[in-house]
Amino acid sequence: MEPLILCIDCGTQSMRAMLFNKAGDMEAVEKVSFEPYFSVSPGFAEQEADVYYSALCTAVKRLKEKNAERFAHIAAVTVATQRDTLVLLDSAYKPVRPCILWLDQREADVRLENYFSPAEIAAYTLVGMRKTSEHVMRRSRAYWVQKNEPEVWAKTHKAVMLSCYLNFRLTGKLSDTYAAQIGHVPFDVKSSDWHKNAKNIGYRQFGLTKEQMPELVRPGGRLGSISYEAAEETGAAEGLPVIAAASDKGCETLGNGCLSEDVASVSFGTTATVETTTDKYVELLRFIPPYPSAVEGFYNPEYEVFRGYWLISWFKKEFAAHEMAEAARTGESVETLLNRRLESVPVGSDGLMLQPYWTPELKMEDARGAIIGFNAAHTRIHIYRAIIEGINYAIMDGIERMERCTKTRINRVVVAGGGSQSAEILKITADMLGVPVTRVQTHETTGLGAAILGFYGLGEFTSVREAVSRMVRVRDVFTPDLKNSRTYRRLYNEVYKGMFPALKSLYKTGNRILEEQP
């Protein structure tokens, strides 16, 4: 039997353990769900680090129980996790508090004046970055812990991403891939490493020190081997190589086969994103760096819709009681029922337009979600289609920014994530984007990307590009209806793009009134 890669994909709500072969086929998968987070205060999102490791162990054990013969052919292990989930460790590398997730909205009471010189603040002000820099500092998890849990901070020896912690539990070595350093940490994207100078302003920006950062290796590099303890806990063979992968989105982009600027990888997940891969350092928002790519020497400029397909969960909870009851009766999923009804609503949702800023962008702090254009004919299915269209309008905005920054026209989109499993959604997406939309052979593209890096790291392929050419195959192509595309383009240019400028002052005033109320 050909060698297999055991791929671990740790998401916000579940852990997947998958087996991939060299042809890019997923031979087996086990999924273990868990509560995404708990909140001790409004806006907080935390989870115990060992909830993730326990789910990892359970998923791998189940995979072994059901695939004993295949398990003997595992050649390496890779780990990809959710991004921007911080784990604080003591000197024995044990968590000192629950993880703080990427969904967390807490802010620290910090000011630039307390950490930066007048000259540095003047420089931030001159380039229009003072407000953004203060926002980044307030959102730093490390500063929040320093201010609110000083006794916890006193015990903190290392501050790592969740991927690093899981790799440590598997190998006993505190190291991680640089392609997973996406979050509120002082990572230098241009050098693919921590800032060399311990006094660099990046450390003050996030409230961390160089000594608190873990060792980093390139994607496809070796992090260590499965330890005796991890072998006992997971059932994986002791001594198996653990190969560095990348963040979940970075692996997903790789698994989508997105290796050039003219192809965009769109993820219809909890956060909807659009990424491309380029060897140029490209900032879609000024002074906001791109993410490190799973391909060494490349970057992934990314545009995020923070509450992307989370809006589907919100809609189901608040408006889809009828479909939920029907799903319980028929055995179909709620999403299948809703998506089938999308075709009953015309292009443009009969004038309903949704702006999906349930969580605002970094440089649009005052923004809120909005729906305009209601009339008496609209139904909840109109709202559902407007959600799908609203997310896609935001993706169109991201693609426009990418094309301006890379000076390259995007002529194909590859889609992954939960929403990509719906042909109805992908047909709408193709019409809206005006380019072919494709799916690859599996919707588990994060696992596929991690497997690509695993086989590359073992030397089974001479390059990541060769691995992609051998392991990624287009399964479905959705071509746009040009008439629909023209209508969507006009709605985007003449309505959607005007919504935020028109509502901006109202958002700001409403937020101020709410903040001032006794």
Image: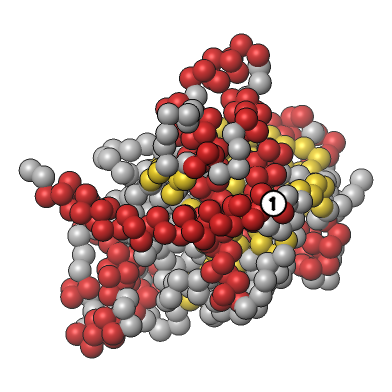
Asked whether residue 494 appears in the rendered view, the answer is yes
Quadrant of the drawing holding the C terminus? top left
Q: How is the image coloured?
A: secondary structure
Quadrant of the drawing holding the N terminus? top right
Q: Is residue 102 left or right of residue 106?
A: right
Amino acid type shown at disc 1: Lys
Q: Secondary structure at mark 1?
A: helix
Q: Residue at x 82, y 47 (%)?
A: 475
Q: Provide residue 281's location: percent of width, then percent of height.
A: 56, 79
- Looking at the image, which is closer to me, 495 or 16? 495
Residue at the limit of the structure toward the top, as seen here? 329
Query: Would you name the residue on which mark 1 appears?
Result: 483
Residue 314 lies, with reference to residue 438, above or below; the image says above
Q: Residue at x 31, y 71 (%)?
A: 133
Q: Provide residue 438's location: percent of width, then percent of height.
A: 75, 52
Q: Provide residue 146's location: percent of width, then percent of height.
A: 24, 59
Q: Provide residue 198's location: percent of width, then percent of height.
A: 37, 80
